[in-house]
Amino acid sequence: DTEVTQTPKHLVMGMTNKKSLKCEQHMGHRAMYWYKQKAKKPPELMFVYSYEKLSINESVPSRFSPECPNSSLLNLHLHALQPEDSALYLCASSQGRYSSYNEQFFGPGTRLTVL
Amino acid sequence: GQQLNQSPQSMFIQEGEDVSMNCTSSSIFNTWLWYKQDPGEGPVLLIALYKAGELTSNGRLTAQFGITRKDSFLNISASIPSDVGIYFCAGPGSGNTGKLIFGQGTTLQVKP
């Protein structure tokens, strides 16, 4: 299995809602990532988990809360988002943060719209 | 900080033509990755390069790791309509953090 899966595919939420994005991989990868991507721009890194521990937080606002329940799963909890948070949210995984191989494999993304 | 300059920004070509795009940096990279992203989808890894001077092919795609370690090229031969998308180059950030530095992307449009 060489896939990273993400649910839901699309999400519309109000500014007072709480929702969660889910990501799963079964490649035995030990590093997982959340990215935010605006239209026609490259992905922007938000968080890195290495061996289920948060290793990088790119100064992301606290209304985004990541969670890594186990080595295969990554969640992103959303609360009190702003309309400017509307974007494509991508999950990725790689063999390991310290691996000499830096290949990251991306999921299909969740298209988030905040009203 | 580290930056990747990708060019051209966009290309509009006729089906069957060859395509060439490149990525340059003022810093040395020890890995170059090339991704393609279709609209509304996540980036898909096309080619990974690990050695200076390395030339790697994946079907009609060929990528090269520049000898100076500061550039990389991606060529697509005999383009077809499904080649449409945004192509990103990427390389690892310094400090072995797992962070990837991305180029700004090359948008490719193919006219049938």
Image: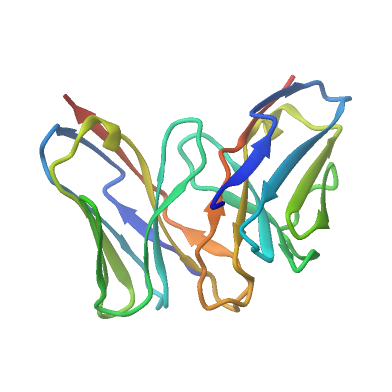
Q: Residue at x 33, y 77 (%)?
A: B69
In the rendered image, the vertical position of residue B13 relative to residue A3, given as above or below: above
Q: Residue at x 42, y 35 (%)?
A: B38
- Residue B111 picture quarter: top left
Asked whether, in this view, residue A76 is left or right of residue B24, the answer is: right
In the rendered image, the vertical position of residue A66 relative to residue B64, given as above or below: above
- Residue B62 picture quarter: bottom left
The picture places residue A70, in percent across and down from the top left corner, at 81, 58
The picture places residue A113, in percent across and down from the top left corner, at 68, 24
Q: Residue at x 79, y 64 (%)?
A: A52
Asked whether, in this view, residue A94 is left or right of residue A64, the answer is: left
In the rendered image, the vertical position of residue B1 relative to residue B69, given as above or below: above
In the rendered image, the vertical position of residue B28 relative to residue A10, given as above or below: below
- Quadrant showing the C terminus of chain B: top left
Asked whether, in this view, residue A9 is left or right of residue B101, the answer is: right
Observer-nearest residue: A74 or B66? A74
The picture places residue B18, in percent across and down from the top left corner, at 13, 45
The picture places residue A13, in percent across and down from the top left corner, at 78, 22
